[in-house]
Image (cartoon, rainbow, N blue to C red):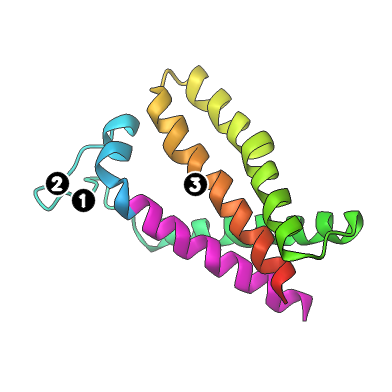
Amino acid sequence: MEYLNVVAAAVASYVLGALWYMALAKPWMAAAGIRADENGRPESGMGPVTYLLAFIAALLVAGMMRHVFAMAGISAPAKGAISGLGLGLFVASPWIMINNAFGGRPFSLTLIDGGYATFGCALIGLVLTAF
């Protein structure tokens, strides 16, 4: 049953990411320096592999968070959400900031990507502990 929780949490985070980046597509593309085609989509034409990798990443994060939560005894939804929020805000987002800073990227990119990491981890934590 724990594997289903991990998959459900990964799917929830993936859907949040889709909504997050659809809502912030223009500022994200501007901050990331990605050119848009005439339809407003990235010229690079992110294909199915990009989306598959994004789901695999969500699955890996959810799986590791399940392991950490089990080791720490985190089982209540509120604690799961807060713990996930903390992991996103204080573990994932600082690494994103470092990568963007050394890459000379604008801080707005860190806010967009770090925001998704933070809220995505919070959602994973909530879903993992809701079952």
Q: Nearer the viewer, residue 23 or 104?
A: 23
Which numbered disc covers residue 101?
A: none
Quadrant of res 8 = bottom right
Mark 3 or mark 2, which is nearer to you?
A: 3
Neighbor class of circle 2 (other Cα within 10 Å; few <14, some 14-19, many 20+) is few
Q: Amino acid at mark 3?
A: Tyr
Q: Position of residue 20 (x, y in %)?
A: 39, 52
At x 59% / y 59%, what residue is drawn? 123
Neighbor class of circle 3 (other Cα within 10 Å; few <14, some 14-19, many 20+) is many
Q: CA distance from mark 1 to mark 2?
A: 5 Å
Quadrant in which the N terminus appears: bottom right
Give the prevailing secondary structure in the magenta stretch.
helix
Quadrant of res 127 = bottom right
| Among numbered discs 3 and 1, the one appearing first in the sequence | 1
Q: Is residue 79 covered in magenta?
A: no
Determine whether, in the image, residue 83 is placed left or right of residue 39. right
Q: Secondary structure at mark 3?
A: helix
Question: Height in image: 25 above or below 127?
Answer: above
Q: Is residue 6 covered in magenta?
A: yes
Q: CA distance from mark 3 to mark 1?
A: 20 Å
Q: Which residue is mark 1?
A: 41
Q: Which residue is mark 3?
A: 116
**Farthest bottom residue?**
1
Residue extent of the magenta highlight: 1-21
Q: Nearer the viewer, residue 18 or 104?
A: 18
| Among numbered discs 3 and 2, the one appearing first in the sequence | 2
Question: Height in image: 28 above or below 48?
Answer: above
Q: Amino acid at mark 2?
A: Asp
